[in-house]
Amino acid sequence: MIDLFVYGTLQIPEVFQAVTGRCVPAEPARLADHARYCLKGLSYPGLIVEAGAVTHGLLFRRLGTPEVARLDAFEDDFYERRTVSVTTLAGETVKAETYIVPAVSNHLIDPRPWCLDEFRRRSLHSFLDRCRAAGA
């Protein structure tokens, strides 16, 4: 079982369910010293280490092996799953996994901040169709 911090499309319940096959409760959390940016030519974001930055997202607790395997398969090859420390709204510090763009792939980062609301408006429908068609 792992705890997972998500910061992009997986924050949307329909996307998380399309990928994992389950609807799982989550709680707001934040990750210090990491920043979320657009990725060149893609509708979803990437997370990089950046001192002083804070990224807000959701924390899913106690995900099982089947969900984690589906999430690993869903994420692009350039991501790396790493353990980080996130803070919940209650102030609890939790060790969780997250998907990060490693320094070797920083050339994929577009320096524009990624916006969840903009993604919902512009890309969610087609993104969900692709997730479902891929059997994610």
Image (cartoon, helix red, strand yellow):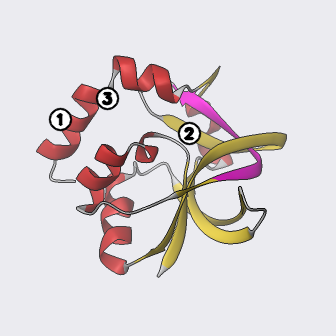
- Label 2 and label 1: CA atoms lie apart by 21 Å
Question: Which region shows up in magenta?
Answer: 29-39
Helix or strand or loop: what does disc 1 sit on? Answer: helix
Q: Which mark is residue 124?
A: 3
Looking at marks 2 and 1 on the same chain, the residue that comes earlier in the sequence is marked by: 2
Q: Is 9 left, or right, of 34 in this rendering?
A: left
Q: What's the residue type where badge 2 is placed?
A: Gly
> In the image, residue 11 lies at what x, y percent?
46, 45
Q: Quadrant of residue 95?
A: bottom right
Q: What's the residue type where badge 1 is placed?
A: Asp
> In the image, residue 88 lies at what x, y percent?
69, 60
Where does label 2 land, which residue? 46
Q: Quadrant of residue 20?
A: bottom left
Q: Residue at x 63, y 50 (%)?
A: 102
Q: Quadrant of the C terminus?
A: bottom left
Q: What's the residue type where badge 3 is placed?
A: Leu
